[in-house]
Amino acid sequence: MRIICSVGLVVLLLVGLLRCQRTTKPEPPKKTITSAIPEPVTPPVSITVAAIPPRPIVSDSLLLEPPIIDSSGTLPPLKREFRAVWIATVDNIDWPSKKGLPVADQQREFLELLDMSQQTGLNAVVVQIRAAADAFYAKGSEPWSEWLTGQQGLAPDPFYDPMEFMIREARARNLEFHAWLNLDRATFSKVASVAPTNISFQRPNWMVEYGGRKLFNLGLPEVRAYVAGTVANIVRNYDVDGIHFDDYFYPYAVAGQTFADDATFQQFNPDGLKKDDWRRQNIDKLIRQIGDSIQVTKPWVKFGISPFGVWKNQKNDPQGSLTYGGQAFYDLYADIRKWAREDWADYIVPQIYFSTKFDRANYKVLVDWWIKNKGNRHLYIGQGPYRLGRGSEAGWLEQTQLGDQLRHNRQYADVLGSVFFSAKSLKNNLLACRDTLQTRFYQHPALVPTMPWLDDVPPNQPRNAKAAPLTDGIELFWEEPEQPTELDRVRYYVVYRTEGVRLPRTTDPRRILAIRPAEQGTRLIDRSADPKKRYTYTVTAFDRLHNESAATSVVYRTGVN
């Protein structure tokens, strides 16, 4: 039975409100589009940004609780940290578990991965939706993936749009959804299912056969425009949080084979570059075009790249890392340091799949190198738990390896999170890696770091927060704020709680009681409340880029009657 607040009960404590004028974020500099983007499958959407009204700000200085220091004297855990997992679909690595599963089983398996991610303490998933010029989504020109339905070009039956399903379910668990695309493959192998509508049949002159695959010839301007247009179409048609590319640009070398792009090199090299430099220029142009296509379509969508972890070895360039082995600059023609330092992407996730004991490419050496070369955007580290318990490298045979890596990351404020390869590794809990995350590093929730160059204005604060005791807890309810623009739209609410009548310290994630997606409403029941205690609650709103509003008026009430 709910008892509404009234005289005689403990009443609302309202914090004085200070009003301030919200300032409109200045428009970022316009980027120059480096080449035309093909005609999209669907017409572009017009985006209107309305005038931004003033908003109230609540001071949390009144009766603010003191900082929380545990018995060991350690600092509070991180409130902001990107925690993600790669979900690979190519060759059914992570999902679906095999080709041609019934739709109900496909969906059940994906929900299990999302539930695992949420329970592990993650806040994002990076899902491969285009592995070989194919699609795990309906609104596009490329054929359905064979790893979804068993035959490339065959639609799911009964029909559904996997991307819409995945985004909806990720949001319900407050997980960001980053769409991961492979850049260079048109076919995966000689035995792969290839539909007549695959681009390798439609545009054979765009292909180079190499290593048993048909790969895009990225020296052709029309190929780069096609890839950028594919990205723009996905961004236009789906409410993704990010677009993500991995380490495949030009292919990894295959012994005894040559990537046959001489004719293209002769035709499209107006600057007279050497071939290696020309290939790097092609990838530079493609990265810029992709970033531009995102910016002009939905400027709030993030652009991320996950390159091979080594740019150059120091023996080849004094600016390189003290490593010995493969190099993205020379082997894949990817000048990843340039992209990072010139802020062409919103985040970089170098794949540092080496242990802290590997002398030829040491994990700590590479993390430290990336911190110095990351530019002004976000740096997350690509972790490789798939290697745990395998091979001859001593570090990966130790159960403490993943924890050692994460502890090293957290020594540096510039390392803003991790992405784990892959979901199967966490699901199988290799060397207790998921247990390590849940109990040692991610035992408290973390919110995604903000990107002020995309949006730095918080949403309006929730209104009219109230509380009432129930027989099984304390009910909190509030009204959603005004949301005049897309960037003001509330993505989720965070409810903080502390014992007594002091304001919760909202900088400390240990005070987070719940993270509630906006679609689930503005009502929450705190069933963990102790009926013998008094609590103070605070509610804030977050927009799609994780800017946090001012706190609501604080509600405090005795425990359950």
Image: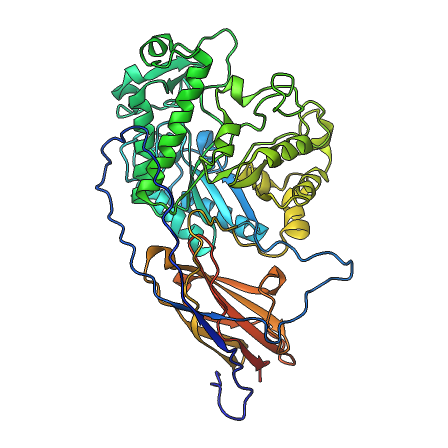
Q: Nearer the viewer, residue 476 or 60?
A: 60
The residue drawn where x is 54% and y is 47% is 82
Q: Determine which quarter of the picture holds residue 542.
A: bottom left
Q: Is residue 91 above or below residue 331?
A: below
Left or right of residue 266, residue 71 in this image: right
Left or right of residue 227, residue 459 in this image: right
Residue 461 percent across, percent down from the top left: 44, 67
Please identify the residue farthest to the bottom as the structure is shown: 8
Q: Determine which quarter of the picture holds residue 210.
A: top left
- Residue 145 visible in the snapshot: no
Residue 401 percent across, percent down from the top left: 70, 37
Q: Nearer the viewer, residue 82 or 377?
A: 377
- The quadrant the C terminus occupies is bottom right
Q: Determine which quarter of the picture holds residue 293.
A: top left
The residue drawn where x is 33% and y is 25% is 224
The residue drawn where x is 67% and y is 58% is 76
Q: Is residue 178 above or below residue 518?
A: above
Q: Nearer the viewer, residue 456 or 127?
A: 456
Please identify the residue farthest to the top as the structure is shown: 256
Coloration mode: rainbow
Residue 543 percent across, percent down from the top left: 42, 57
